[in-house]
Each structure stands twice: as C-alpha cells, then as structure tokens.
Image (cartoon, rainbow, N blue to C red):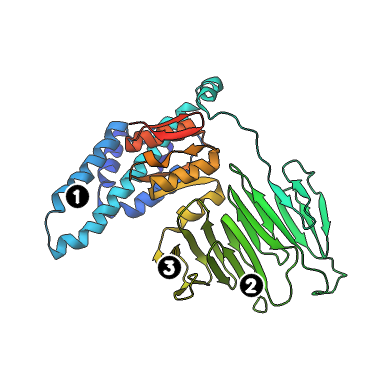
Amino acid sequence: MNKAIDGTIAPEERQELFALLSTPEARPLYDDLFEQLAEQSVEGKDIFSPQEAAGLLRQINEEIRVQSPVVSPKIFRWKPVITWAAACMLLLVSLLSYRFFILRERETSQGTIAKAMPATRPSASIMLTLADGRQVALDSAKKGETFEQKGSSAVNNEKGMLSYSAPAEEPAGKADIVFNTLTIPRGKQYKVVLPDGSQVWLNAASSLHYPTRFPDGERKVELSGEAYFDIVKDDRKPFTVVAGKQTIAVLGTAFNVKAYTDEPYIKTTLIEGRIKLASPDGNNTSILKPGEQAILDGNRLQVKAVDTREDVAWKSDLFYFSNTDLRDVGYQLQRWYDIEVDFSTLPAEKLYGQLPRSTPLPQLLKVIEKTTNIKLKLSNNRLYVEQ
C-alpha cells in the first residue's frame, strides 16, 4: 500500500493491488488508500492508468449485471457489498483522475488557466451588521479591531474569526440584549465565537443572526444557509437554532445544518452529542444520534444514517462527493465559485470523489467529465451540460 501511495510500486505488485481492489473484501485497504491519496500534495506516478481504472469499473459492472437477475437469499445478501464495491471503485477512479488531470495541470501556464476561469466579479465582503445598523467589512477591517456595543465587544481576530465577550464588570442579565448579523458571500467562509464560547463555522452564501450576549435562560440564533455548530453545554440555557422552518433544540453537541433558501430540503447532521428536531406543524419530532441526518421536506421529517464526512468536508476546505446527486454538486459549485448553474440541463447522475476547494473550476470540471462522461461547459459565468 505504501509503495502504491509514493509511486514506487513494482509492476507485479501493482497488478496484485489491481486485482485486490476489485474484490468486496477490499474495504479496509480501500479506506486507507482513499485517506492517503486525499492528503497527497505532491506529484507521483498514478497507481493505475486510465485504461486499468476503466477496466476495474467494467469488471465490477459485469459482476452486478450477471448477479442482479438472479433472485436468491445468498445473492440478496451480497448485492449491497457489490454495490458498495462499485461505489468505492468509482470514488477511487475519481481520486486517480484528480491526480492525473489536476496535478499535471499545475504545470500549465497561469495564462492558459486564466482563459478558462469564470469572468472576474467584484469580490463581495464578509459583512458584520451591528446593532445600530452600521456595517463592517471584516475582510478589510484591521486585524484585532474591536467593535464595542451595549453589553459586549466583538474582536476581529488575527485567525480570521470574530469573537465576542461581555465586560467582566457588568452584571449578567443587566445589559440590553442587542443583535448582530454575520453575512458570508459566495466563495468565502468565516468563523464566529459566540458570547458563551460556542463556535460556528459559516459556509459560503450564509448568514447568522444572534444576540451579542445571551439573556438568562435562553440561547437562540437564526441561520440562513449552512453552518457547523460546536455548542458549549449549559443545562441552564438550552441552545436553539432556527433554520428556515426547522427548529433545533441543542444540549452540548456538534452538528451541521444546511438550510439554503434555494434548495428544497433542510438537512441536519449530528456529529456528536444529542439534538431534538420537530417538524413545523409539531406532529413529528426526532432525537438524532451521532452519525444520523434529519431531512425536512415540507412538514415531513426523515432520519437516516449517513457518511458525515460529506456534510462537514466544506469546513476543511474540501469537496467530498459520496453518491452525491449532480444537482447537489451544482449548488455547491454555484456558491463556491460564484457562478450560475442551469439546473434544467443536469442529468440524474451521482458523483464520487474528493478535491480541495482551491482547485480551479476548469480543472474540477475536467475531473467530473473524465469520471462520468458528462460534458460541463462554462460560458459567461453560466454552467450547463453540453448536449
């Protein structure tokens, strides 16, 4: 495995790995390969050629084609394993495609890449709206600058985050409760440390409305867009997140909420701890366990187990696709690269793979094309599938 990662693998060892990865028993090996490939930052030899990678896919597809028509208890038990193997191989191929196409593209001149990049737009600022209506562009504000307000102060820290604190001399509960709003534009992220020490990472095209200090007995914030919450436990002050029509009751926990107004669902994914959710009509409630995701569709609340890495990868500046709908990918690209996506042209396809968000858009589109045969075209900041 290590030889495969660093590119020193011998031809006979390479063929052995090629055969092993096409078997259902390869999951631990595959997981290790996935993690190490994702961390690669230097060029190396590709583990498999594009022809060999395509051969692996054909082999797995043939297994599925042959076994699917047969209905028996034994085959039924194996089908999920085979399906998983196919998904893993697609993910592996996408990672190899990343190395093959993206790493080699780094040798391309910057002028060539610039020609294919989306048209440059004026960069919007990360904006803090204070209680008196003043707006501060945090991108251009001086690092360490303090914004004083009633009962609290906010500091634009050196680490690229905003943190709040209450004056020690002012008795708790005596100050007026005022609110701030932190707004993140497309293509950017930011972190805020709330007055109680809870941390919130805000994704692109998101905003958070919150008090500059929490009153006695309650901690409540309002989210539009996507955020990752790491909440300080305080049994005396329950924490509540209002995201669209979804209200989330929190104790001490870490979770991700995705509640964009241009997407049909609100997704809440629990990483650790415990949260309680209710449908807007109050007829359906659920307490999530770590590794579970609640999807609110209208008044319908569904809960399922998920791979949480996909939902929190953005926090680590990654795109992580694991059986992800192409439409969902389109929403991510639209917000991160500040483009418009023609969703009416997108086919019902699933994507697998992991790429850094620093990847230039033209290179990312090449990876998608090579791993799916979907031809995505960018014209005048509009992305669509070329028929």
Task: Name the foreground residue: 381 vs 116.
Answer: 381
Q: Residues within 10 Å of mark 3 (few under 14, many from 20)?
A: many
In the rendered structure, the answer to whether residue 256 lies left or right of residue 32 reads: right
> Contact (CB < 8 A) between labels 1 and 2?
no
Q: Which of marks 1 and 3 is in front?
A: 3
Q: Mark 1 points at which residue?
A: 64
In the rendered structure, the answer to whether residue 191 lies left or right of residue 99 reads: right
Q: Under tag 1, what secondary structure?
A: helix
Residue at (27, 32) in percent of width and height:
51
Q: Which of marks 3 and 2 is nearer the N terminus?
A: 2
Q: Mark 2 points at which residue?
A: 233
> Contact (CB < 8 A) between labels 3 and 2?
no
Residue 346 in the image, given as x and y percentages of width and height: 37, 41
Q: Name the image quarter holding the N terminus.
A: top left
The CA span between labels 1 and 3 is 33 Å
Q: Under tag 3, what secondary structure?
A: strand
Mark drawn on residue 301: 3
The CA span between labels 1 and 2 is 48 Å
Residue 237 lies in what quarter of the image? bottom right
Q: Which of marks 1 and 3 is nearer the N terminus?
A: 1
Residue at (16, 53) in percent of width and height:
68
Q: Under tag 2, what secondary structure?
A: loop
In the rendered structure, the answer to whether residue 25 lies left or right of residue 3 reads: left
Relative to residue 167, is residue 141 depicted above or below? above
Identified by mark 1, the residue type is Ile
Residue 175 in the image, given as x and y percentages of width and height: 82, 70
Q: How many labels does the image show?
A: 3
Residue 25 in the image, given as x and y percentages of width and height: 27, 54
Identified by mark 3, the residue type is Leu
